Image (spheres, coloured by chain):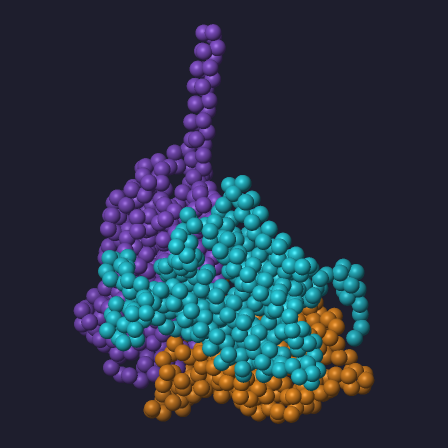
Amino acid sequence: MTLELFSQYLLAGITYGIIYAIVGIGFNIIYNTTGIINFAQGEFVMLGGMIAISMHQWLPLPLAIVAAVLLVMLIGALVEILFIRWLDRPSVLRMIIITIGISILVREAALHIWGEGVRSLPYFVGNEITTVRILGARVSPQVLWVIGVCTVMVLALSLFFKYTLQGKKMQACAANRVAATLCGISTKNMVTLSFMLSAGIGALAGCVMSPITYTQYDIGTGLAIKGFTVAILGGLGSSMAAVAAGLLLGLIESFSVSVVPLAFQDAISISLLLAILFLRPHGLFGNKDAADLKEF
Amino acid sequence: MKRSVTATIIMLAASLALSVSMACAETIKIGAILAMTGPASFLGAPEARTIEMLAEELNAKGGIGGNKIELVIKDSGGNPEKAISFAKQLIEEEKVFAIIGPSTSGETLKIKQICEDGKTILLSCAAAEQIVNPVAKYVFKTPQKDSQVVHAIFETMKANKISKVAVLASNTGFGQAGKGQIEKQAPESGIQVLATEVYDSKATDLSAIVAKLAANKEIQAVINWSIEPAQAIVLKNARQAGWNVPIYQSHGFGNIKYVEAAGVAAEGVIFPAGRLLIADKLADKHPQKAVLVKYTKDYETKFKEEASTFGGHAYDAFKILCRAIEQAGANKEKVRDAIENMKGFVGTAGVFNFSPTDHNGLGQDSVTMLTVKGGNFIEYKK
Amino acid sequence: MKRHLPLGLLVLAIIGVQLLTRATDTAFYLTPLTMTAYYSLVIVGLCLLMGYAGQISLGHAGFFAIGGYLSAMLTTKNLVPFKDNSLISLCDELGLLVHGQDMFGSAFTHVQPWAACVCAVLVTIVVAYAIGIPVLKLKGHYLAMATLGFGIIVYRLALAFPLFGEADGISDVPGFPILPGLAVSGDFSSRVSNYYLAWGMVALAVWLLVNLIHSRVGRALKAIHGAEGAANATGINTSRYKLNTFVLSAVLASIAGIFLTHYNGGIGPSEAGIMKSVRYVAIVAIGGMANLWGALTMGALLNIMSLRGMFGSYDDAVFGAILIVIMLFAPQGLLGISLPAAFKRILRRGE
């Protein structure tokens, strides 16, 4: 394998990987504060792209993206308030089914609002064939945008959780909900905040990847599956682990093309998911005892 | 006595006249099973819009022979089991005259036998060869034959001195059928297929596989056979990687939206298709020009989007059916015979010449090579 | 005796509906009714698993597809090119093969539908045990995702191999002869017999399950669902019960797949898809997780409406909406709603 080919695979893997990681982080944020796995996470990514594209008709690109992210955050909050907030200690089964239902509804609504067609935001820099050379590989500058924006998001999130009051409150909820309530933290609002945050990062990822991958009403499901594969691979609850796991999955998928027919690429991520679930459910970086203690 | 006999005769005559005139006012029910939503919606949605538009237009003129058309459209979502259920429903319950569709080959093959047993005409908008081979009495299809499309590609390649290619096909029925034809015809056309890869119809990034293929410097051209939006991703990834070999696509590229999606990367793509996409640029005396210009204009005015060849297949199905009903009256058997013997029907995909052994009716001349220049489709000239 | 009353009602309903369609000349309803019967087989099995044993399965369509695809593939694959193979000749001698002509008139040999059915069910059992053992060790979200992953793998496998017809699926599946003159097939002439055959199978399955639920096994399952740790402590081998229930529900789904494929004359990858699995779960939920009759009734109603296209383009949206509404307001299922309690829940504020 030449350096050029290797770098091409590497960059492709990092691009896929970081997108999966963002969706995985979205899962983790909500899971941490609520113990719920939000199957509708992928739909936030789709909505971000779709709304930005619609907004772009009237607003310049950067504003359209900001507007889209804010709107999707609002939608995230709405979803939480309408469907999740007033449930009284729901069972896992119930939550899974509700979030699956939400994801279906959002997807069908998108179908009827925007139609079945494929759309995309314009490239931020250049057009469909501009390339930059990195490490011998040639990629679209949009790839750099994806990697850059997502990395900044991850860093911002970790700073948020570590240093801001809201972030620390959310971590408290994740650690022990009852104790957090006793400390005066409004856990209900933390839950809404976590949905908004997840929705926001998903939407931004959706906007920034739209030129490369296109946005269509049904891209949410596939992304959600990859996203929670990544979240579990890293260990449910840990965002840093999700990033590592995301990159790992992305690289595996990308390099697999050199040895296995492309037709099996999707089967690889599912097989990985099953393998992790059967062999090491607490994830590559998770702690078994901590995972056992966590409420499901 | 005489008076009551006369009265009875008059009444009988009157009721006969009344029933005859009522029969004339009957509607002709035409069923359609199309994938308006779901993974094949970019096929089914324009098809449904097209036949609704045509039925409306026809009914505004009073229908066929005074009979209005009643369309019963069912959305199968691309699911074969729904197609089967709807086919049986349309045949037994709605007692439709004929069925237009389905949009995909998978669904069509599942209902082929049902329509044959139910003696109902099926005009499929799907591409697979097996739909009309072996020939079933009541089953017809309107898209071009894959074998002719592939032949057109290979002829052009030979003229351009290309002999070594890579093939990328999507994992749908359309993609697999094309791949099959390519592999079948390659040896006899002197083309060598160096690599074949199948990508998911929902793929979002194919730069890895493009890189792998680009590393093989022997590949002179790429055939990208797909009908889904993902084909535009291949184009972008290829050009972004600096891989500038000629890219040939299939007639599944026949939608200007795909060109828009690929943007500058679509420039120079060569593909065979029906002449719908270059309707305006045809010579005025071209037999298809009038039909194509009218359809594209009407469709674009009504639905505010560009017409595609996919909708065109439904146009052809509907118009062929109507022409046959005009010729033979509202009798299923006679209409079937009329379709089977129809010659010289000018449609969007080409000029149809049906026969008892050819239930597709399109010849090699129905496809012409097109290319993309300046974001528009133009005719390809060597 | 009392426990058999609903079963008796079911049989009466089955006969009654058929006579009604004959009286009103609406015999075409029998087609979606028959298809619904086969889907109901999946649903009652899933109801046992989810409601009584308490294990969620988001991939049950996978078992349906395994049954359907294997049976379809074996009965449509032409074995003439392999006739010199020793395994094939052995099958021939055992009378497992059918010789005939294909639609082009050339020689065609395929596996007998009975043999294909047995083979498909055996494979399902093996796969269900193989998947069940690791999957049932998981709980909650992990269990859900593992079953979802299983369903997706089956879907991808069906889509990837030319043997399974790739995206087009398998067509021209022959009818399944049960007795001389009685066959599971989609012919117009055998509509009524097929209807009774299908619903007869459902009635049989329900009878078996009702007996199971009221036996020691059923009590053990309830104990496991209620409090697994306690059940374990009383000496019930929880993992064995869960596993066997899983396999039983898988076999029911597989049989449904086999027969529906012969009835429809074909199968496509959409039968293995996520949306199908979600649909089955939605129906079990709306019927009331542990309510066999609820699931059966709701399933019949919703499937018939869906198969007749009553939901139009909103088909998936309807099932999604049902999922949400039922889970929010009536987690015990539609037939377990008590309106005052529901109102209280909506109005209640607080932790």
In this image, C1 relative to B19: left or right?
right
Q: Is residue C67 above or below residue C240?
A: above
Q: Position of residue A279 (x, y in %)?
A: 53, 88
Q: Position of residue A127 (x, y in %)?
A: 43, 74
User: Compared to A137, does B80 lie above or below?
Assistant: above
> Where residue B83 sits: x, y (%)?
44, 56
Residue at 36% x, 40% y: name it. B332
Chain rendered cyan: C
The percent position of residue C28, horizontal first and vertical second, equals 48, 47
Q: What colour is chain B?
A: purple
Which residue shows up at 54% across the image and 68% down it?
A: C277
Q: In the picture, which quadrant includes the N terminus of chain A?
A: bottom left
Q: Residue at x 66, y 84 (%)?
A: C235
In the rendered structure, the answer to whether residue C231 lies left or right of residue A151 reads right
Q: Quadrant of the C terminus of chain A?
A: bottom right
Between residues A265 and C254, which one lies in front from this camera angle? Answer: C254
Residue found 27% across the figure and 83% down from its top = B217
Q: Which chain is orange?
A: A
Observer-nearest of A247 and C74? C74
Residue A55 image-quadrant placement: bottom right
Q: Nearer the viewer, residue A288 or A155?
A: A288
- Where residue B223 sits, quadrant-wise, is bottom left
